[in-house]
Amino acid sequence: GPAVTALDEAAALLSTDGGATLWPAWLDETRLPAFLRALPDDAARSRWCDLAMDAVRRGGVTLETLFHQRVERHPEHVYLRAGDPGKPQEWTYASALRRCRALAAAVLRVAPRARVAIITPNGVDGALLDLGCLLHGILVTPLAPNTDADTLAWILERLEIDVIVSGGRDQHRHVADVLDTHEIPARHLLLDDVDHAPDGATPLGAVTAELSRQDVDKILAAQPRFGLDDVATVMFTSGSTGRPKGVTFSLLNLVSKRFARAAALPQVGDAEVLLCYLPLFHTFGRYLELLGMLFWGGTYVFTNNASRDTLLNLMPLVRPTGLISIPLRWQQIHDVCVRSLESGAAVGDEPTADLRAVVGDRLRWGLSAAGYLDPRTFRFFQRHGVELCSGFGMTEATGGITMTPPGDYVEDSVGVALPGVRLRLAEENELQITGPYVAGYLDEEKRPGDERWLPTGDIFREREGGHLQIVDRLKDIYKNTRGQTVAPRIVEQKFTDVPGIARVFLVGDHRNYNVLLIVPDLEDPVMAEGPDTDAAREYFHHIVSAANSDLNRHERVVNFAVLDRDFSLEEGELTPKGSYRRKVIEEHFAD
């Protein structure tokens, strides 16, 4: 068809030295759903993605290019929305770009050649400042609002930050204290005006108010832009020990990833509406959502907070078309939907209407990543018209690495490789990745064109159709006293959604046999008599025996213990994401 012919023509032109000025327009047209859905299959869309990545480099396409293209295509289309859904504040593509430029110019007025840190809860001005820096050659790092003082000081000094912008009164005071205590000579700007600004801090609004449109144009015209391979931004990801890791992203990483996601989600376009409640200092919120909506030309709606109740209240009001979230949120939405369906069935309602009363009438796709979600939950949403996909990613991949192709879900898999990234299973089946959107690290020598395979630290197995299944973290794999390896997650997942069990933890590293620690679900009717009775112990014994029947001999649970408390973030037993810190748990529950 015509779409395939267009790919053939592009491939032929890319094989020559010509056409550099044609590529931005070609990319702008072929990224649209009308073109991508006209391609015959996923293989053709992957081919388009590879050509697009070549065209990005050939045409020098940056985020600034993309933003100006969206403004030219639909200047009055709403990009960002915030506030009361009934009377929202809105920023069109044209007004959002003007605000980005004004904020970037204000930072440069305060500190020419600025290097910027942003520490703020999610908000429109914080997002637009971040974009303004990315567009205009200003190195920027977004930081978690709860970054502790020592880590914040280390990051500011490590990146030689000379402008730090805070949002929210708590962050204003926190930043002021760190700058004072550690004698860091950075300028402190406030995203929002406060009645009593900390000493030495300046409201960013006061700086932008002094700049005319001509001032903004002049300042930004004089500002050098980053090349596609230059480090444009740094994000910090917490390690299990020591300082956080600084992950460095080039404009090529950021732009190429957008075309990869477009190839994987060909139905997404400028009618898309996403909710902003994932943190914008992580890759999912910052790249897939904020930059994704910019790429697709859709609308991004800010929430007041990231709570479950806020999300459930807003979904029927905002009516998102897609939703990207962690497994916990999807399970919570599922549980509310099930209750709605059950109550609706009692009075004869149409089941689909009851589900849509919870999630809104436009939700048609979703993505669950950063953890395990029961296949029954995926199937539930798919039965009711929401194509819930599974995925896996990491900060170093500018977000996602794999995703379920819409309509091709395989239970317990995280999908197939996204277009534009190459995968291999190395020693011990550890997944390694390479490609144009695989980022680097601070202090790492990385030259454009280097083929560097990045280890993910995760063990996978390949299943039918190229689908991948996570086995466990490489560092979490146990080895028993016989030298046999055990993936604790595989065993632990056997006890997901079992009545009376809140969660379990397998102990087995350097041991003769495996022991299961059980956190009982005291709210479940099964535990009505308590977890310490003979009946409860017999019940748990039955559950363990049933799980063992599906496990290899060396993976089986030989003994179990019922705990009197859950694992705790405060005790250092869980990460902020809720993952196990296995060594700590083993130490704390050694008895």
Image: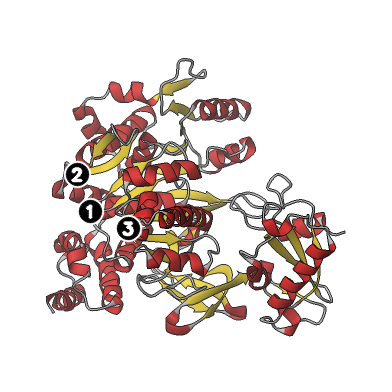
Dot 2 or dot 3: first in sequence order is 2
- Near mark 2 (Cα within 10 A), the count class, few <14, some 14-19 or many ≥20, is many
Q: Residue at x 42, y 48 (%)?
A: 233
Residue for badge 1: 270
Q: How far apart are marks 2 and 3 (CA)?
A: 22 Å
Instruction: Give SS at disc 2.
Output: loop
Residue 538 horizontal side relative to residue 427, left or right: right
Residue 241 horizontal side relative to residue 412, left or right: right
- Residue 92 location (% of width, % of height): 22, 40
Instruction: Give SS at disc 1.
Output: loop
The amino acid sitting under disc 1 is Asp
Residue for badge 3: 255
Residue for badge 2: 77
Instruction: Give SS at disc 3.
Output: helix
Dot 2 or dot 1: first in sequence order is 2
Q: How far apart are marks 2 and 1 (CA)?
A: 9 Å
